[in-house]
Amino acid sequence: MNPDAALPDEAIQVVHRSDSSGTTNIFTGYLTQISPDWESRVGKGKEVEWPVGVGGQGNDGVAAVVQQQAGSIGYVELSYAIESGLAMATLENKAGNFVIPSLESTSAAAVGVTFPDDLRFSVSNSDGADAYPIVGATWILVFDKMKDAAKVDILKAWLTWSLNQGTAVAEELGYAPLSDELKALALAKVNAITAF
């Protein structure tokens, strides 16, 4: 893909998480989508048997090894990469476009997606033209019926704030906002929470 690039003549060291990690699940899930060989030999999960490489504990452990050892490549969540000033890979997405990881390209992965009623989804390897291909979501799990009406009101107010005004705070922390479509679906779920 980069025939004119002048790369150093040194071995590449793969750095992966040594602990159970949602980031590993997202990364290996993407690899299973694009590589039948990866899917059959390694698979996806919070923990996998890595065929090569060295492990680092948490995002900070992976980042430390990558930053300290020349020729290393690893993965961390976007917010950590931004905060740590790590160099990030521009990847070719499913639409054939090369995209740099950013809050915008993360959000773009959820644009135009049809989401299931239960909101259990993956937007990794999205069809979106502007989407970064390795993307994951974070969920908040709540009961749809609760005993205490006062707690229901407080929870709904907080979740509604989080999905609206709280988006700015999340962006400051390096987390991408939901697409308008997904935000509307999440707000409908919040509005459906009731007391019994």
Image: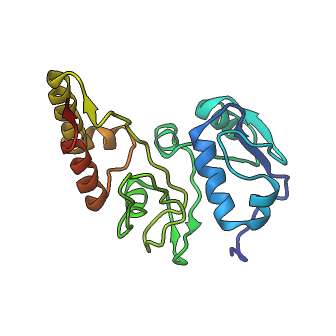
Q: Residue at coordinates 69% horizontally, 74% vertically from top-left?
A: 2
Query: Which of 31 and 173 lies nearest the eye of the viewer?
Result: 31
- Residue 27 location (% of width, % of height): 62, 51
Q: Where is residue 35 in the image (x, y as percent from the top left)?
A: 72, 66
Q: Is residue 117 above or below residue 4?
A: above
Q: In this view, does 40 lie to the left or right of 30?
A: right
89 sits to left or right of 177: right
How is this picture coloured? Answer: rainbow
* Depth check, front residue: 81 or 70: 81
Q: What's the residue at 22%, 50% (across, down)? A: 188
Quadrant housing residue 142: top left
Query: What is the quadrant of the N terminus in the image?
Result: bottom right
Where on the picture, by quarter, is residue 66? top right
Residue at position x 39%, y 44% in the image: 175
Residue at left 70%, top 39%?
A: 47
Q: Does 181 appear above or below 152?
A: below
The image shows a total of numbered marks equal to: 0
